[in-house]
Image (spheres, rainbow, N blue to C red):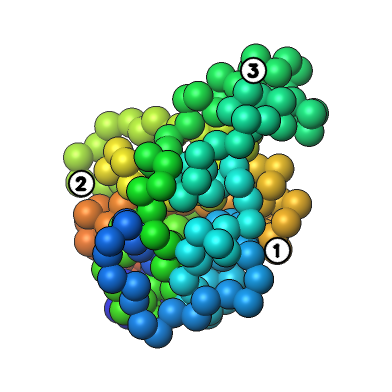
Amino acid sequence: MEDSRTLMESLGLKYEPVAISLIRKGEAIPEGYARPDKPLRHCQAIMRARRGEMLLVQADRQACPVGASSLGFVQAPEKVASGEFHHNMGIYAEQAAARATIEQRPSLEAGSMEATALAPLSKATLKPDVVVMTGTPEQMFWILPAATTFSNGGRVTADMAAVQAACADATLKPYLTGHVNISLGCFGCRKTTDIAPEEMLVGIPVDRMREIVAAVREMGEGPIPKSREKA
């Protein structure tokens, strides 16, 4: 709860960070998380959780086959794997370009996942694997690169695509690499959720949270408010 308060107050976030736990096959299903009454996309679940809901999304409640296949619930449908699906959407000039994007995306083994559990960070009863935040570029700047390089300096590299902003870029990339990652959004999440045009996403692996929160807390007492005062 304290981490969530620090991030929200220091950065001026409109919505709470979302704690995401990836529950693998054979692991216990948590109590206290509501099973949605209809299928949801992973991005939709994040946007609902940032508003206060605690959700348990199992395989039969995954609405997006693209996200579900990346998250390890199902095999990628042939039209997705071949690139036909995203090429037909007009996002890629050639089917081969869409296929290459799917081939290079971060993903888990098909059938390895039982569910995703999502909740506002302050309410989560499970240890998250990843914390996803949404906000303006100015707010997210204080996470990546500022907080990420606060202790050791250096530069950062972001990894994203024109598709799968919430599932691949903001959730799986941090989970699999241990690095903070950003996404500017994608066709799917911008079309099917309430994410605003001026908002973007940041995914933080749980092992980096203490470091990130501490940096934001310290910068919140100096650099953050000073930069917002303008010259």
Q: Residue farthest to the bottom?
A: 32
Residue found at x 57% / y 32%: 161
Q: Where is mark 2, residue-wise?
A: 151
Cα–Cα gap, marks 2 and 3: 38 Å
Cα–Cα gap, marks 1 and 3: 28 Å
Please tell me whether mark 1 sits on a helix, a strand or a loop: loop
Quadrant of residue 220 within the rendered picture: bottom left
> In the figure, 227 relative to 81: above or below?
below
Cα–Cα gap, marks 2 and 1: 35 Å
For residue 117, side relative to residue 63 (left or right) = left
x and y percent of residue 207 in the render? Answer: 22, 54
| 1 or 3: mark nearer the eye | 3
Q: Where is mark 1, residue-wise?
A: 194
Mark 1: which amino acid?
Asp
| 2 or 1: mark nearer the eye | 1
Residue 97, numbered circle: 3
Mark 3: which amino acid?
Ala
Mark 2: which amino acid?
Ser
